[in-house]
């Protein structure tokens, strides 16, 4: 979780930085769907039961959920680029372990290590936030956020081609090769961010989160085998509730928590995170269902009898459409706002799944379903970071986005476990082979549709905002309002003041209205990384302001003036020279 965020680049990024970071995100996201083309064969390949085989998929998603906040916090402490390379290296090791094994447990161990690389997604977003100018940040973050789905979607045809023509272990060799390429490109192209958070790593928090998620997902996967009312199933659910509750209480008391749960108390953050879980659930259902439906023999009466490669190509539009919706999202969000684009995305996903219930009798119909759902997920995924950034103070955007990525990972983990359980329990035994049934596919689509409906209900309760992307203008929350109120007291001499027109060793510039006109007598307050006021001033007649800084580091400049909405802008001072920074106040916010 990042505690030092910025909207101004602290180190120049080359034109290749964003594509390389997006490629790293796609490489680790490939792990989510790498084995989908052979999922129906896993019980035979690993000599185990269908319910046990689902853990080959679920373990990857589960470790990804745990890795997201862990790698984010380690990146803040020791360097985001360094931890990105560590994540990719762990993925390569996990791929090689799975490549050399035919037994269930070693493959699960390898898959768990592969999933741990999912921490690369928030690390990539953090590097973009530290290096890119504001005008490029929105579209870059949308691309990085969508890479989860893009990688998962594009992996299906590629993995199917490999699995159909070679031994299934070649999938892992290919994954290891992708990881090595991503490491090399990152070392060559991506600079390290100089920003570092203070504090220590919350090791008990990491253990508590991992234990709670495992205790929750294990009975979901095995409940039908053990019995849903059995003591083991109910006991594990109860243990999960207790562990996660105690973990949450502990995180609230820790000075530098693994997951900053304090950000969840804001309505916008809570609703966005809950909606994120629903988007995560809906994304993974199609990845599990359509390839199996397409590959089942037509003799079943409902299978479409396609090869692995054709099945992969039919589902490939899921990832391709997500990739192409990133620039579309940027335009829609700029005009209508991320809340509207999230609602649009969820509606499109819902239409895709509802229509898909009646479009399961031909391969071309699955392509239509993939295109629709891919477009909806692309819009929804791209909207989430902007919604979070627009809902919290600039100093909390890293922690809030890390928590949001965790919620999405939990959604995909739950989806994998639940859909795997549904398909295993509705399967028919044909000659000792468990074949999924049409009933199982339809129930899975209904579960996804239900998740979308819940997500829509949550999204409609998000407050309306007048700005679009939420990246260029970060509105102040109640905490910043309090800081601005304290600035009035600071003007009597409580804090070091800058005098408008002078250029102290700190920040200077002009306070401007939305139309570019200067704003006189605007209150500008300097807040350090610990949330303490470090200075305050009033803008002059030409809108000019100047504030000295006590030391180099990350700061938030909070500005407010009558007739304008408040603004909170994060920036970094390297201590070497004054920073020229204009502050553009938004218009008055529209009440939710």
Image (spheres, rainbow, N blue to C red):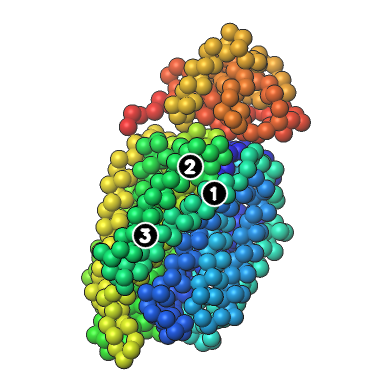
- In the picture of the structure, the residue carrying the numbered disc 3 is 236
Q: Residue at x 62, y 22 (%)?
A: 534
Q: Is residue 46 above or below residue 11?
A: below
- Mark 2 secondary-structure assignment: helix
Q: Residue furthest front?
A: 231
Q: Earlier in the sequence, mark 1 or mark 3?
A: 1
Q: Is residue 498 left or right of residue 381?
A: right
Quick check: 493 above or below 40?
Answer: above
Q: Which residue lies under the disc numbered 1?
A: 204
Taking 302 as reference, is 32 above or below it?
A: above
Report the side of 118 relative to 445 (left or right): right
In the rendered structure, which disc, 2 or 1, sits on the residue that comes first in sequence? 1
Instruction: Tell me the residue at 34%/59% (across/down).
Output: 235
Q: Secondary structure at mark 1?
A: helix
Q: Which mark is residue 428?
A: none
Q: Are marks 1 and 3 in contact (CB under 8 Å)?
A: no
Few, some or many residues within 10 Å of mark 2 (<14, 14–19, 20+): some
Where residue 97 sits in the image (x, y, percent)?
Answer: 60, 75
Image coordinates of residue 163 in percent, x first then y, are 50, 82
Between 129 and 485, which is closer to the camera in this rendering?
Answer: 485
Q: Nearer the viewer, residue 528 or 305?
A: 528
C-alpha distance separating marks 1 and 3: 20 Å
- Front-most of 312 and 328? 312
Q: Is residue 59 visible?
A: yes
Disc 3, SS: helix
Q: Which residue is mark 2?
A: 250
Pointer 2 and pointer 1: residues touching (CB < 8 Å)?
yes
């Amino acid at each position: 979780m990042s505690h030092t965020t910025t909207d101004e680049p602290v180190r120049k990024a080359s034109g290749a930085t964003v594509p390389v970071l997006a490629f790293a995100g796609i490489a680790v996201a490939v792990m989510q769907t790498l084995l989908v083309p052979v999922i129906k064969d896993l019980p035979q390949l690993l000599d185990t039961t269908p319910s046990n085989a689902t853990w080959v998929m679920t373990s990857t998603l589960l470790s990804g959920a745990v890795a997201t906040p862990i790698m984010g916090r380690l990146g803040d402490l020791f360097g985001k680029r360094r931890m990105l390379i560590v994540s990719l290296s762990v993925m390569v090791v996990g791929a090689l372990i799975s490549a050399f094994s035919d037994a269930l447990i070693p493959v699960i161990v390898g898959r768990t290590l592969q999933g741990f690389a999912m921490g690369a997604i928030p690390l990539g977003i953090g590097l973009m936030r530290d290096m890119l100018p504001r005008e490029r940040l929105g579209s870059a973050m949308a691309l990085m956020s969508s890479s989860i789905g893009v990688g998962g979607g594009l992996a299906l045809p590629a993995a199917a081609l490999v699995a159909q023509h070679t031994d299934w272990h070649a999938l892992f060799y290919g994954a290891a090769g992708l990881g090595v390429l991503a490491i090399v490109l990152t070392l060559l192209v991506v600079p390290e961010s100089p920003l570092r958070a203070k504090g220590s790593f919350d090791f008990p928090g990491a253990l508590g989160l991992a234990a709670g998620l495992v205790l929750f997902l294990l009975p979901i996967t095995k409940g039908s085998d053990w019995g849903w009312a059995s003591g083991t199933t109910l006991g594990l659910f109860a243990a999960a509730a207790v562990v996660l509750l105690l973990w949450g209480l502990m995180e609230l008391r820790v000075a530098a928590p693994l997951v900053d749960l304090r950000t969840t108390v804001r309505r916008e953050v809570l609703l966005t995170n809950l909606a994120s879980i629903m988007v995560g659930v809906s994304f993974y259902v199609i990845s599990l269902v359509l390839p199996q439906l397409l590959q089942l023999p037509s003799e079943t009466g409902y299978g479409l009898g396609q090869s692995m490669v054709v099945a992969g190509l039919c589902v490939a539009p899921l990832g391709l459409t997500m990739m192409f919706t990133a620039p579309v999202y940027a335009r829609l969000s700029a005009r209508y706002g991320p809340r509207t684009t999230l609602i649009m995305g969820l509606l499109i996903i819902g239409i895709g799944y509802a229509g898909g219930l009646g479009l399961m009798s031909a391969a071309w119909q699955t392509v239509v379903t993939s295109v629709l759902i891919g477009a909806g997920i692309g819009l929804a995924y791209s909207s989430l970071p902007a919604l979070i950034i627009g809902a919290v103070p600039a100093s909390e955007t890293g922690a809030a986005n890390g928590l949001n990525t965790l919620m999405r990972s939990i959604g995909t983990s739950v989806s994998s476990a639940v859909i795997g359980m549904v398909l295993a329990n509705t399967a028919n035994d044909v000659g000792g082979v468990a074949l999924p049934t049409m009933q199982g596919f339809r129930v899975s689509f209904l579960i996804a549709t239900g998740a979308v409906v819940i997500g829509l209900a949550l999204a409609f309760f998000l407050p309306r905002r007048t700005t679009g992307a939420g990246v260029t203008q970060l509105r102040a929350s109640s905490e910043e309002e309090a800081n601005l109120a304290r600035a009035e007291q600071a003007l009597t001499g409580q804090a070091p003041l800058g005098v408008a027109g002078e250029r102290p060793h700190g920040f200077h510039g002009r306070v401007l209205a939305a139309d570019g006109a200067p704003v006189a007598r605007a209150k500008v307050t300097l807040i350090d990384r610990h949330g303490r006021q470090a200075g305050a001033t009033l803008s002059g007649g030409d809108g000019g302001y100047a504030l000295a800084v006590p030391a180099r580091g990350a700061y938030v400049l909070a500005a407010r003036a009558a007739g304008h909405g408040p603004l909170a802008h994060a920036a970094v001072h390297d201590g070497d020279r004054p920073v020229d920074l204009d502050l553009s106040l938004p218009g008055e916010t529209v009440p939710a």
